[in-house]
Amino acid sequence: MFDSLTEKLVTTLRTLSGKTRITEEVLDEVCRQLRTNLLEADVNVKVVKDFIESVRGKALGKEVQKSISPEQQFIRIVYEELAQIMGGKASELNFRVRPPAVIMVVGLQGSGKTTSTVKLAKYIKQKFKKSVYAASMDVYRPAAIEQLATQMQAQGIEHFESSITKSVRERAILAKEEAIRKNMEVLLVDTAGRLHVDNEMMDEVSELAQVFQPTEILLVVDGMTGQDAVKIASSFNDRLSLTGLILTKLDGDARGGAALSVRAVTGVPIKFVGTGEKPEDFEVFHPDRLASRILDMGDLLSLAEKATTTLDPEETLKLAKKAKKNDFTLADFYSHLQQIKKMGSFENLMKFLPGMGQMTKQFKDMAPPDTELKKIEAIIQSMTPSERIDYNLLDGSRRRRIAAGSGTKVEDVNKLMKQFLEARKMMTRLTKMSLGKRGRMW
């Protein structure tokens, strides 16, 4: 996500390293580079102009703080301005209405509307513990209604079923009545799209908005389309008064033009981002956190939230207690890896850590973290249950057998054992501190 922009911005800001003060001449050159970085990332020209003027003005007018270097102070200004142009803070969904709260999802064909509707339904059900009902108004695209029904069933979410497909308005009225009859708290409406913005589509979604009186109208836009996404958002907002945006395919966007432009141009907040194809690849949009990630400063808050919602607390506590007693086995190590895998790929998780975005580029000739993880899993799976519990059993002949069984080399088995023993020592020290002095944290 935004790899290209991050690399350029970090390189530009490094030119300030070691400066005892930032002169106007130095500032002019850094701002020139920042302007180029943002324009190459397909950020709106006016947004770039306003951003540079604001950064420059604050850098010149800022009192030098003795506690931090000029470089750190300038990076702080850039971070704050990046967060500000994206909205400053997260924008919440509005449920403060008489149920059902209707959320209409609109957008062009291929933007990811149906997938986003499913992700949103799962998010609302899990996060807010609300009863969710889904209805498709897409009577034109073949199997669109069935697609939504199938995906909602997989998430255990009820959906509107009706044979009425001739009149979209009549279908909408029945869907709303059914949601009320079932005492649903939230009604999600997946609308039909077109290949491009046209009057026919706009007239239909406007009519649906009159029927449903939605509390939220969320536009789904493809984040990889850059300034086209901004133009599409402006067109929809002119007719519908959007309450928020869902940016999809952000995992494949190396530039970031749409995310950095759309709020400043349209005034519509980005509420969610899609970061993959799975239902769980869906995040609340936090401008400040994304600004931190763009500058390779990490995003530990999002990583902690991901861990809280994904990891099994009982299993985590059990492993922590075993580690404290120095009783952490290879079987426990394997179990711990399976827990972490639920949070996503190691490569993506590393990007949540400060500095790791750039550090991973230094190891581009090495095997990716997820490839190494598969190798570790294969080695442990090739061990007998007793070997996983007691690593002291792993003599030379057993290690050769395990290497052959896992399709690896004896050197790989030896490397894993060394890493495991080092991790075991570290975990024991850390858990003694956490479970002993700060037991309330667990």
Image: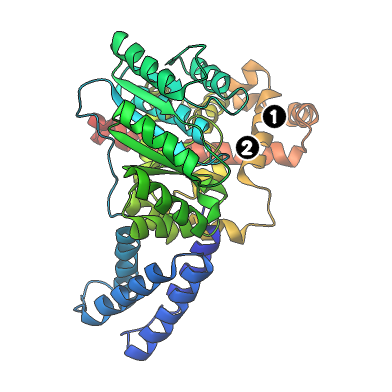
The amino acid beneath tag 1 is: Ala
Q: Residue at x 54, y 27 (%)?
A: 338
Choose the circle earlier in sequence order: 2 or 1. 2
Between 345 and 248, the one lying in front of the other is 248
> In the visual, does 6 lie left or right of 371?
left
Disc 2 designates what residue? 373
Q: Residue at x 27, y 50 (%)?
A: 89
Q: Where residue 74 sits in the image (x, y, percent)?
A: 32, 73
Label annotation for residue 378: 1
The amino acid beneath tag 2 is: Leu
Q: Is residue 361 above or below residue 53?
A: above
Q: Are marks 2 and 1 in contact (CB under 8 Å)?
A: no
Q: Where residue 335 sits in the image (x, y, percent)?
A: 53, 24
In the rendered image, the residue lying farthest to the bottom is 25
Describe the element under mark 1 as helix, strand or loop.
helix
| Mark 2 surroundings: few (<14), some (14-19) or many (≥20) residues within 10 A | some
